[in-house]
């Protein structure tokens, strides 16, 4: 049974807006209600179609009234901020993430109409450390529990959602643990990080990176909203790349810095509003993280259209390379040509200098 | 007496090594190098979920290790027929030598001398992956963290996994205790093999003990640097960087008959008695073949 009334929180961001627009195109869904603290941009508003926008703060009990009066049956919770810069400081970010979720869940628990909750979570809940297994399945837990930032918020949020699921067993709860998003349109921590011409990384470390294309992220969210999957699922593209490889494929310059220096660079770029290098982000840059997506493909029933490498290629179209790969190939190609010419000349000189090998003595075989 | 077997002395004297390949001309080598450089600079190569980088391993790391394997330690391999040509397998070996050169030499041995040119996926302690440079190079060489999840994932994928159950106790043991196996951890490697049904291939390495004879251990420095031990050898740190040159001992690497685990079934991994017995069996086999190899080796320097 498709949902009748869907409530999407965090609709003013790219992914939330795109999901609301996608759901609004589905004639089977009666109403799509988008909630956010800031109004969507005019461009996004045009795409949202028949989505109704409610400017509300999910930290406010008002959200309960919205759910009750519209008799919302499916809630998609995407209003989780990954960076302090986007929400005005770490304190505010934590409040919006954790208190906002608690309010929303409280409202859902009161509501008699809600029968489905979709949580946009993150694979950051697995942490990142040297003690991690290479590939995380949904059943595994963080070996070194994230101590702060987005990952800690997400862990707390998942905890609240789990206890909500226990209290309301009639509500189907799907928690989607996404890997890093990438694509030409989405704006994520990683995309702004990789847009810098010179990318600072941790000296002596190389993270394994698993990416998810924005189109796949959208398709998974839409499927989770309209489908009936309940449980936790890792969502990521197939295959992995090393961070150094990602930087090289994008034609960026890598600047490996020792960890303490990286910290000050992080503070500088944060102040300039460029990129946020939080400590957890730095740990991710050291070790990386890969998740197993068997549950996504088998039980959830979705196979991402883009692999990690293909998603990166699609993103690369929008990022002009600093070092074009053609230039690298041209230089090495001409060097190879030069080597070949030198080799041929040296060979010819060598042949001239070396006495020709004496012809093998002929044996009179004809007589035999 | 089943354990009394006739061991042929230096059986590989009869057959020539399989490894030599036609030498490429210097232009071809330079052209190959440039192609490699171009691939590296544009990121046009594959890596797997464990961070293994076959391109870098084959074109840079292996060629760096090969002279050490062929010329410096003159490694001789035995019993390669015991290593399956396809499918998963768990190579369990003794660990020694202060620095894990033995792990790298076993990797080269299986890649260069085995007819199927098998890649050994090593399991390392978390400390390895905590260290800058060392950790990332180890991953690029195909290593991953020694934990059951990773071991089982690799074995299920049909990879040959290498494990050193002695860990730091083996590699950092004093020189006077050479060739005596230490405790074999908690037998985690046996449970991984049982769950995946992969055969256990005992492997004995002789020669690694003498490369950096550990005559002392500075506990203060070790604690300061966060290391399990800080080695003092006859040449290190007395001779400075020169002390980092390993002594050119003669090496023998022998792979023993595989111990089959599939018949026990995956549920047997929950039976501690069986796990202990198999662990002991593997340990005894390796210890016995260490003694045999030591008898075969004419002297430490070969």
Image: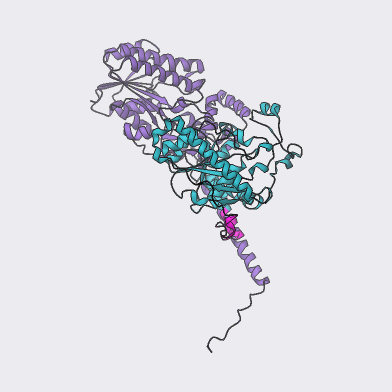
Q: How far from the left and from the top, in percent, is residue A340?
A: 59, 60
Q: How far from the left and from the top, in percent, is residue A279?
A: 55, 24
Place residue B196 in its image quadrant.
Answer: top left
Q: Is residue A122 above or below residue B99?
A: above
Q: Nearer the viewer, residue A115 or A129?
A: A129
Q: Nearer the viewer, residue A277 or B122?
A: B122
Question: Which secondary structure dominates the residues rendered in magenta?
Answer: loop
Which residue is outermost to the top? Answer: A61
* Residue A307 visible here: yes
User: In the rendered picture, chain B carries what hue?
Assistant: cyan
Quadrant of image for the N terminus of chain A: top left
Q: Which residues are magenta?
A: B8-32
* Residue A159 sits inside the magenta stretch: no
Which residue is outermost to the right? Answer: B238
Which residue is outermost to the bottom? Answer: A367
Place residue A17 in its image quadrant.
Answer: top left
Could you tell me how many numbered marks the image carries? 0
User: In the rendered picture, chain A carries what hue?
Assistant: purple
* Residue A202 visible here: no
Q: How far from the left and from the top, in percent, is residue A110?
A: 31, 11
* Residue B16 sits inside the magenta stretch: yes
Q: Is residue A303 above or below residue B44?
A: above
Q: Horizontal placement of A57 versus B160: left or right?
A: left
Q: Nearer the viewer, residue A134 or B44?
A: A134
Q: Horizontal placement of B293 versus A116: left or right?
A: right
Q: How far from the left and from the top, in percent, is residue B250?
A: 65, 49
Q: Is residue B83 above or below residue A242?
A: below
């Amino acid at each position: 049974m498709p949902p009748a009334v869907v409530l999407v929180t965090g609709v003013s961001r790219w992914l939330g807006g795109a999901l609301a627009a996608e759901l609004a195109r589905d004639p089977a869904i009666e109403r799509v209600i988008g909630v956010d603290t800031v109004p969507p941009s005019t461009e996004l508003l045009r795409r949202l179609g028949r989505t109704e926008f409610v400017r509300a703060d999910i930290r406010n009990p008002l959200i309960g009234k919205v759910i009750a009066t519209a008799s919302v049956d499916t809630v998609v919770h995407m209003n989780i901020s990954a960076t302090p810069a986007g929400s005005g400081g770490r304190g505010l970010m934590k409040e919006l993430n954790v208190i906002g979720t608690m309010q929303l869940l409280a409202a859902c628990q009161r509501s008699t109409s809600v029968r489905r909750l979709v949580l946009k979570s993150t694979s950051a809940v697995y942490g990142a450390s040297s003690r991690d297994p290479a590939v995380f399945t949904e059943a595994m837990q963080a070996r070194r529990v994230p101590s702060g930032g987005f990952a800690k918020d997400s862990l707390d949020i998942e905890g609240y959602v789990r206890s909500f699921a226990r209290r309301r067993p009639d509500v189907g709860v799907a928690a989607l643990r996404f890997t890093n998003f990438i694509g030409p349109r989405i704006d994520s921590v990683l995309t702004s990080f990789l847009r810098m011409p010179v990318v600072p990384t941790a000296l002596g470390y190389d993270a394994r990176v698993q990416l998810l294309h924005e189109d796949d992220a959208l398709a998974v969210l839409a499927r989770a909203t309209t489908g009936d999957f309940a449980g936790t699922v890792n969502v990521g593209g197939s295959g992995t790349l090393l961070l150094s490889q990602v930087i090289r494929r994008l034609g960026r310059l890598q600047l490996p810095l020792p960890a303490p220096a990286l910290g000050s660079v992080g503070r500088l770029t944060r102040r300039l509003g460029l990129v946020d290098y939080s400590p957890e982000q730095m740990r991710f840059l050291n070790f990386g993280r890969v998740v197993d997506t068997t549950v996504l493909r088998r039980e959830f029933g979705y196979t991402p259209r883009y692999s990690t490498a293909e998603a990166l290629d699609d993103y690369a179209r929008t990022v002009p390379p600093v070092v074009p790969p053609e230039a690298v190939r041209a230089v090495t190609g001409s060097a190879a040509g030069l080597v070949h010419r030198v080799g041929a000349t040296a060979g010819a000189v060598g042949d001239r200098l070396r006495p020709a090998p004496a012809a093998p003595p002929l044996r009179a075989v004809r007589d035999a | 007496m089943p354990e009394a077997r006739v061991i042929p002395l230096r059986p590989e004297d009869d057959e020539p090594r399989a490894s030599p390949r036609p030498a490429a001309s210097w232009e071809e080598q330079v052209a190959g190098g440039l192609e490699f450089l171009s691939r590296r600079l544009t990121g046009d190569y594959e890596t797997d979920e464990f961070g293994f980088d076959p391109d870098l391993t084959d074109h840079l790391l292996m060629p760096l290790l090969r002279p050490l394997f062929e010329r410096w330690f003159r490694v001789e391999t035995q019993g390669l027929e015991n290593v399956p040509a396809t499918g998963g397998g768990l190579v369990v070996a003794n660990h020694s030598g202060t620095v894990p050169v033995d792990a790298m030499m076993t990797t080269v041995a299986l890649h260069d001398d085995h007819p199927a040119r098998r890649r050994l996926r090593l399991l390392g302690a978390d400390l390895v992956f905590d260290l800058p440079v060392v950790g990332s190079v180890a991953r690029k060489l195909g290593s991953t963290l020694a934990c059951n999840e990773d071991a089982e994932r690799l074995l299920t994928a049909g990879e040959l996994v290498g494990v050193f159950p002695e860990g730091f106790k083996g590699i950092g043991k004093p020189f006077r205790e050479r060739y005596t196996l230490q405790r074999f951890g908690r037998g985690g490697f046996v449970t991984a093999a049982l769950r995946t049904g992969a055969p256990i291939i005992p492997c004995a390495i002789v020669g690694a003990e003498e490369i950096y004879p550990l005559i002392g251990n500075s506990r203060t420095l070790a604690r300061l640097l966060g290391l399990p031990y800080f080695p003092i050898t006859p040449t290190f740190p007395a001779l400075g960087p020169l002390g980092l040159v390993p002594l050119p001992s003669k090496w023998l690497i022998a792979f023993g008959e595989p111990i089959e685990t599939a018949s026990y079934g995956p549920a047997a991994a929950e039976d501690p008695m069986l796990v202990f017995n198999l662990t002991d069996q593997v340990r005894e086999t390796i210890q016995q073949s260490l003694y045999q190899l030591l008898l075969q080796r004419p002297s430490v320097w070969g």
